[in-house]
Image: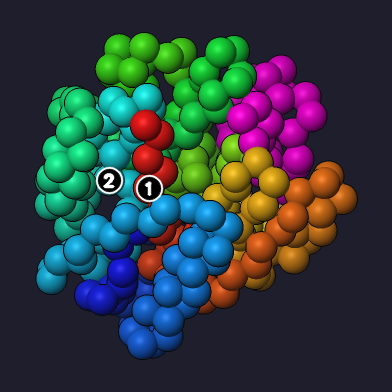
């Protein structure tokens, strides 16, 4: 995670970003701290990536890379405003001694890639349509030696896979069907017949932009319907307030890069 010390909405690269709307920087930092504390309370170890001046979106640490089994498939951002973030993440993984693979294709890390360790023996789900190029999906499969399923996103408000779909445990997911092309919806139905289907309202409240340990599901407090569905399915929702970071087009998951060692 990277604290929003230099967070601001200075440019607009997704439909949520309104450069004329005020952002409460102090509140953003306080809410981010609340998220970090919630994760620590649940037993996670949180590493902090130092934020850099001039990179206001660096708080969305999920976009910096995608790792599986200590191998890191690096990011290559679509927009020049975020390009420099990739090398900050790279330095972090280099210090850990993880193998880092430099991508040739545009991809925004865990924004568009996620991993289910027990589905088909280790399955990558990958989004394309707005940010990550479909060529990056093949590149990730070669880099990581895991099958990659390509899913096409079709709603510009849901421009990253991690706003449309989330792993709940090692093999099941929650998703909002309306974010995907018809064929991608069919693929998801075949792969995950027991998935939790979120409503449009909860998806647009960034409810699916969540972090789950298989039991506790940390999610945006505004997604109350999804929290109830999760509770009914036996999970424990852990709501957190992240209103300020939503103004940049992100929430819980966007702020967290998972380290799969
Ligand atoms: N303002 C950032 C962008 O548009 C938000 C990134 C959200 N991150 C995510 N993992 N969905 O690039």
83 with respect to 190 (left or right): left
Q: Residue at x 65, y 41 (%)?
A: 214
Tell me what residue is drawn at x 49 percent, y 29 percent: 115
Q: Quadrant of the N terminus?
A: bottom left
- 156 versus 248 height, above or below: above
Q: Count every numbered label the image shows and give the total.
A: 2
Name the side, left or right, on which 40 lies relative to 81.
right
Q: Position of residue 160 (x, y in %)?
A: 45, 45
**Residue 131 vertical position relative to residue 225 in the rendered view, above or below:** above
In the picture provided, is 189 more to the left or to the right than 244?
right
Contact (Cβ within 8 Å) of mark 1 with mark 2: yes
Badge number at residue 257: 1
Give how far across and how far down residue 81 sits, in percent.
Answer: 17, 58
Check the picture and name the quadrant holding the C terminus.
Answer: top left
User: Which of pointers 1 and 2 lies earlier in the amino acid sequence?
Assistant: 2
Mark 1: few, some, or many residues within 10 Å (few <14, many ≥20)? many
Q: Which residue is mark 2?
A: 64
Q: Is-magenta flag for residue 174?
A: yes
Along the line of sight, which residue is nearer the eye, 257 or 178? 257
Residue 216, compared with residue 259, is above or below; it is: below
Question: Residue lying farthest right?
Answer: 232
Residue 16 drawn at (x, y percent): 44, 65
> What segment is highlighted magenta in the picture?
169-198
Disc 2 element: helix
Q: Would residue 145 be found to the left or right of residue 96 on screen?
A: right
- Dot 1: what SS? loop
Crowdedness near tag 2: few (<14), some (14–19) or many (≥20) residues, C-alpha within 10 Å = many
Q: From the image, state whether disc 1 or disc 2 is nearer to you.
A: 1
Task: Examine the image and state in which quarter residue 250 appears.
Answer: bottom left
């Amino acid at each position: 995670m990277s604290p929003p010390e230099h967070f601001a909405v200075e440019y607009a690269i997704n439909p949520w970003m309104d450069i004329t709307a005020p952002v409460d920087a102090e509140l953003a930092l306080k809410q981010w701290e609340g998220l970090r504390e919630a994760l620590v309370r649940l037993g996670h170890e949180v590493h902090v990536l130092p934020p850099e001046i001039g990179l206001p979106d660096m708080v969305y640490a999920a976009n910096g890379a995608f790792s599986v089994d200590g191998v890191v498939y690096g990011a290559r951002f679509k927009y020049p405003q975020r390009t420099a973030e990739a090398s900050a993440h790279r330095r972090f993984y280099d210090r850990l001694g993880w193998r880092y693979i430099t991508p040739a294709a545009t991809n925004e890390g865990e924004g568009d890639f996620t991993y289910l360790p027990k589905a088909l023996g280790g399955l990558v789900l990958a989004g394309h349509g707005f940010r990550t190029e479909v060529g990056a999906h093949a590149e990730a499969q070669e880099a990581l030696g895991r099958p990659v399923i390509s899913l096409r996103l079709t709603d510009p408000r849901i421009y990253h896979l991690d706003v449309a779909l989330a792993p709940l445990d090692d093999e099941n997911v929650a998703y909002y069907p309306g974010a995907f092309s018809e064929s991608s919806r069919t693929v998801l139905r075949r792969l995950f017949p027991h998935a939790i289907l979120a409503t449009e309202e909860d998806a647009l409240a960034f409810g699916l932009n969540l972090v789950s340990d298989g039991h506790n599901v940390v999610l945006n407090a505004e997604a109350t319907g999804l929290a109830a569905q999760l509770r009914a399915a036996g999970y424990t929702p852990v709501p957190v307030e992240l209103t300020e970071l939503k103004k940049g087009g992100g929430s819980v998951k966007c702020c967290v890069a998972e380290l799969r060692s």
